[in-house]
Image (cartoon, grey):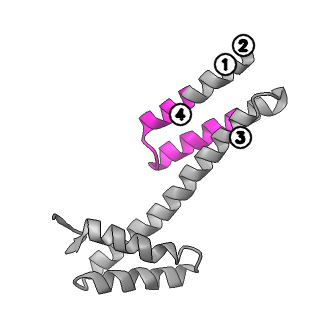
Amino acid sequence: MRQGYNGFCRLDLRLYASRRLAKALDREASQFICICREIAASMAKRIKSGIKRVEIAERNRIRNVAVKSEVKTRIKQAVTALGSADAEGTATVTAISAIDRAARKGVIHPNKAARLKSRLMKRVNAAVAH
């Protein structure tokens, strides 16, 4: 298997870290970093850059999950607001701006953002037509 992160096997790292860190997501940042270092140190060589990459990857993953969750929530709110004329426009604009923000941050691919906006607008236009 291909080695990554200075000696860490990527698949082993992901499986072990996800199981171990699932319990630690609600802890403080300092405890989180300590747990990341403990996981990285217990897995393979103690190379500083490898340990840091583990921390950064996990921190980014958690942030990306939050952004994706917000996008899904905003889309659901826009879809449920299709019946009322007042909330329909604001919910749709909020959903589209959340999608654009996620694409700008690099959390989702720009093509996926375009696809999500297109599907949302298709539903909005169908609701307005009826």
**Mark 1 sits on what residue?**
125
Distance from Cα at disc 1 to Cα at disc 2 = 6 Å
Could you tell me which residue is drawn at 54 percent across and 79 percent down? Answer: 29
Could you tell me which residue is drawn at 39 percent across and 73 percent down? Answer: 17
Q: Secondary structure at mark 4?
A: helix
Distance from Cα at disc 1 to Cα at disc 3 = 16 Å
Q: Are marks 1 and 2 in contact (CB under 8 Å)?
A: yes
Looking at the image, tell me whether mark 1 or mark 3 is earlier in sequence order: 3
Q: Secondary structure at mark 3?
A: helix
The three-letter code of the residue at mark 2 reads Ala
Name the image quarter holding residue 129: top right
Could you tell me which residue is drawn at 35 percent across and 74 percent down? Answer: 16
Q: Look at the image and say whether residue 38 sits in the magenta stretch.
A: no
Q: Position of residue 33 (x, y in %)?
A: 46, 81
**Mark 4 sits on what residue?**
116
Looking at the image, tell me whether mark 4 or mark 1 is earlier in sequence order: 4
**Mark 2 sits on what residue?**
129
